[in-house]
Amino acid sequence: MIYLVILMIFVGIELISHVPSVLHTPLMSGANAIHGVVIIGAIIVMGQAEGLLSLILGFIAVILGTLNVVGGFVVTDRMLEMFKKKK
């Protein structure tokens, strides 16, 4: 299993390094959508948590996922502002 994780890390780095800069904004928007699904999954896990540790870890997952989504939208909005005409 560790071999597979290490292999996927190297494949991911190789794929991301070859993405043209023009595609970074659409990819960030897609990543935001994926993290939205992660937040929903963390909320579902929190709802079924039986111990305090599970509840705390689920809450931390929701907070970190939310920060990632909000930060991604802020960066995407800032990048799209560069393409608008100035008044």
Image (cartoon, rainbow, N blue to C red):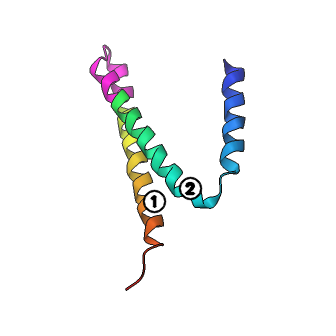
Is residue 47 left or right of 26 when viewed as pictured?
A: left
**Amino acid on which the number 1 mark rests in the picture:** Val
**Amino acid on which the number 2 mark rests in the picture:** His
Question: For mark 2, what is the residue?
Answer: 24
Element under label 1?
A: helix
Q: Which mark is residue 25?
A: none
Question: For mark 1, what is the residue?
Answer: 75
Asked whether the viewer can see residue 34, the reply is yes
Is residue 69 left or right of 10 when viewed as pictured?
A: left
Name the quadrant of the C terminus: bottom left
Label 1 to label 2, Cα distance in Å?
A: 11 Å
Percent position of residue 86, x then y? 41, 83
Quarter of image, res 20: bottom right
Element under label 2?
A: helix
Percent position of residue 16, x then y? 65, 47
Total numbered circles: 2
Q: Is residue 67 magenta?
A: no
**Does residue 47 sit above or below 29 in this rendering?**
above
Other residues around mark 2 within 10 Å, as few (<14) / some (14–19) / many (≥20): some
**Bounds of the magenta segment:** 42-58
Quarter of image, res 8: top right
Q: Please tell me which residue lies in front, 21 or 5.
A: 21
